Image: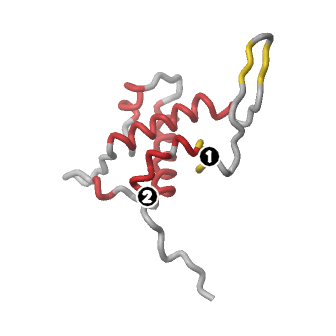
Amino acid sequence: MIMTVEELRQIITTNETNQGLALRLQALERAIQGYTNNNFRQFKNAEGVIEYPADIKLGAINLLKWEMEMRDKTGIASETISRHSVTYQGRDASNMVNGYPAELMGFLKPYMKAQFGQGLIL
């Protein structure tokens, strides 16, 4: 796993259960591995456990924060209450990656690997 639930709780405050956070971390790890075509095995320690680099951990924390705080606001173009106005950037396939804003996924560029061998055989 990218980090333990205990490590995550030291950085963010949430009412989510440990089981819910563990599930989110596992899903995020799979999404990162799928997007980068990288299983990060080059970062295994002596016990055979993958220790993700600090920038991957921080990027994952930012993705989780966005997921928990902003996911339900995706798609809001404008909101006005009295003199208070809020406008969000429209989200579509051109600026989203795996359901996350593309600007939050930039930390993964150095870890991207080419994918070969998925062609069709006729």
User: What residue do we see at 46% from left, 57% from top?
Assistant: 36
Residue pushed farthest top?
82
* Up-down relation of residue 115 to residue 93 (above or below): below
Q: Position of residue 68 (x, y in %)?
A: 57, 31
Amino acid residing under circle 2: Met
- Depth check, mark 1 against mark 2: the one in front is 2
Mark 2 lies on residue: 112
Task: Check disc 1 and give the amino acid type.
Answer: Gly
Q: Residue at x 29, y 58 (%)?
A: 42
> Residue at position x 37%, y 30% from top?
6
Q: Are marks 1 and 2 in contact (CB under 8 Å)?
A: no
To which quarter of the image does residue 33 belong? bottom left
Q: Residues within 10 Å of mark 2 (few under 14, many from 20)?
A: some
Residue closest to the eye, 13 or 21: 13
Q: Where does residue 12 sit, x and y in percent of width and height?
A: 45, 25
In which quadrant of the rendered image does the C terminus lie?
bottom right
Q: Quadrant of residue 58?
A: top left
Earlier in the chain: of badge 1 and badge 2, it is: 1
In the displayed structure, does residue 40 sit left or right of residue 61? left
Of residues 20 and 72, the one drawn nearer to the viewer in this rendering: 72
Residue highlighted by disc 1: 99
Q: Using residue 120 as the reference point, say whether residue 31 is left or right of it.
A: left
